[in-house]
Amino acid sequence: MQRNEHEAVTVAQPAALPGQEPSALRAWLNRLSRPFRESIWQRELRDREAYLANAQNLADVEARMRALERNAFSRHGAFG
């Protein structure tokens, strides 16, 4: 069967679990698949950014940055 270039192709959407909206299902699947999609480096970067974003003021940001730098050297050695 040949398709006309103007003919719409429809794809069936997966059925939502009972009591869940499609957006809730999509969010659940995203959380489930995140560890497989993200590298360790990406996870560490996201966690560091969240840690710095929770600072109360500039002095707190600077203190947190110094703590992250100290932690990086102690964890990976002098050459990172």
Image (cartoon, helix red, strand yellow):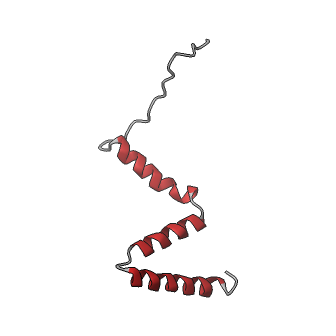
**Which residue is at 51% across, 57% downward?**
34
User: Where is residue 28 drawn, in percent x and y?
Assistant: 41, 51
Where is 49 relative to 26, above or below? below
Where is 28 relative to 77, above or below? above
Q: Quadrant of residue 53?
A: bottom left
User: Where is residue 12 drawn, in percent x and y?
Assistant: 46, 29
The extreme left residue here reads 19
Q: For the image shown, how many numbered marks are present on the structure?
A: 0
The front one of 47 and 12 is: 47
Judged left or right of residue 28, residue 44 is right
The extreme right residue here reads 79
The front one of 74 and 66 is: 66
**Which residue is at 56% across, 64% downward?**
42
User: Where is residue 54 drawn, in percent x and y?
Assistant: 38, 74
The extreme front residue here reads 58
**Which residue is at 49% across, 28% downward?**
11
The N terminus appears in which quarter of the rendering?
top right
Q: Quadrant of residue 80?
A: bottom right
Judged left or right of residue 15, residue 11 is right
User: Where is residue 23 drawn, in percent x and y?
Assistant: 37, 44
Where is 19 relative to 37, above or below? above
